Amino acid sequence: HVPIMSQILMRAQCPALHGKVPRLRIETPPGAMAFVDWKEDVPVQMGGWDRWVKVQALCMSLGFSRKPVVIFCEKKDLASFIHGHQEGFRKLGGLPEMVRTDCLKSAILQWKGSKSVLNERYERYMKSLGVGVFPARPGEPEDKGKMEKRIRDIFSRLDFKHQVYADMADLQRRTDEAIEKLEGTWRSGATGRSVTESFAYEQGYLKPLPEHFPIIPLEERRTRVRMDGTVFCGGNYYQVRGTYRGHEVLCVNTGHEIIIFHEWEEIGRFGYLPKAKGMVRLSEEAIVDTGVYLSDKVRGWAVEVGRRQVALYHDIVARQSL
């Protein structure tokens, strides 16, 4: 009964403190942390007066200098989320050690602090850059308070209501220019100096950008290899070696190629043909596999089609456009 009585006395004597959890304000070292969050459904006039559209803004801010960047996207899906990270890192001119992101369902499958279970695609992308991910707790905006404040600072000062933008590129350019001016007036809590001065110092602590960023896939899909040795992906069939029949594989559409992986080993690569549907993309390597009986003539026909398939496709498309 003593603990219960203690709680009653605390409520009576300190009602203002009851139910509040003590917190500690911290600052992160230069280059250690970047905060990431969405500003959703931002209304802007695009292409003319009263032509309102809603765009999504991925906001990134360095924890030490408070340097912000905003990347505008048409959607708020995982591909846009990853693209926003990439463009944000480019604008910062380097990579932080960690990213503190909102606990988005599309990116974070299960929150476990620094050991959270991430979406495979997001995790693979961030690992390839050597950047860790430490998502904020679900429903705890205080975990990314610096980012929340910076978003309010930015969007309370940008006058979208009385501006007309030609397109997304114009919106991005003019917003970048406006933010750059504001940085001279904002202060970093870690240094007491302007964001501009603090960022110039912090840049020396960021990891260098990669020579080539990883390709951001348009689509990824896990599926099983059919018994005829083909994989269905994006409306077409792709042939792999017969040894993978019945195995689960990962199909990645980069927008230029379809790449097929089995346990992170590449087992097939085909040029992406956007106008093809129901096409069976043949693999010469799979066709010459002697594990399946074919007469020499039939196997020769298959090899011929496999070698000429893309040329035949382009020839048909070219004739239709005449």
Image (spheres, rainbow, N blue to C red):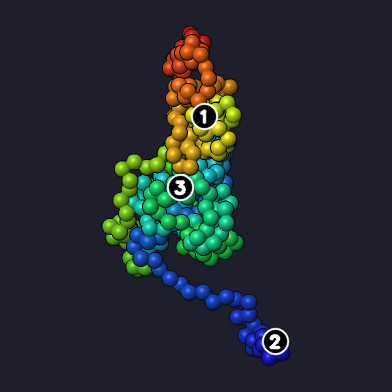
The residue at 47%/45% (across/down) is 82
The Cα atoms of the two marked residues, 2 and 3, are separated by 50 Å
Amino acid at dot 2 = Ile
Crowd class of label 2 (few under 14; some 14 to 19; many from 20; radius 10 Å)? few
Q: Is residue 199 left or right of residue 313?
A: left
Name the residue carrying label 2: 4
Report the front residue among 296 and 76: 296
Name the residue carrying label 1: 242
Kindly indicate whether the residue at mark 3 contacts the one at mark 1 (C-beta within 8 angstroms): no
Amino acid at dot 1 = Gly
Residue 318 sits above or below residue 254 on the image: above
The Cα atoms of the two marked residues, 2 and 1, are separated by 69 Å
Q: Secondary structure at mark 1?
A: helix
Q: Is residue 268 left or right of residue 105?
A: left
The Cα atoms of the two marked residues, 1 and 3, are separated by 28 Å
Q: Secondary structure at mark 3?
A: helix
Kindly indicate whether the residue at mark 3 contacts the one at mark 2 (C-beta within 8 angstroms): no
Tell me where residue 297 appears, x and y as whole percent: 48, 10
Crowd class of label 3 (few under 14; some 14 to 19; many from 20; radius 10 Å)? few
Report the front residue among 44 and 118: 118
Compare marks 1 and 3 and give the one earlier in the sequence.
3
Nearer the observer: mark 1 or 3; the answer is: 1
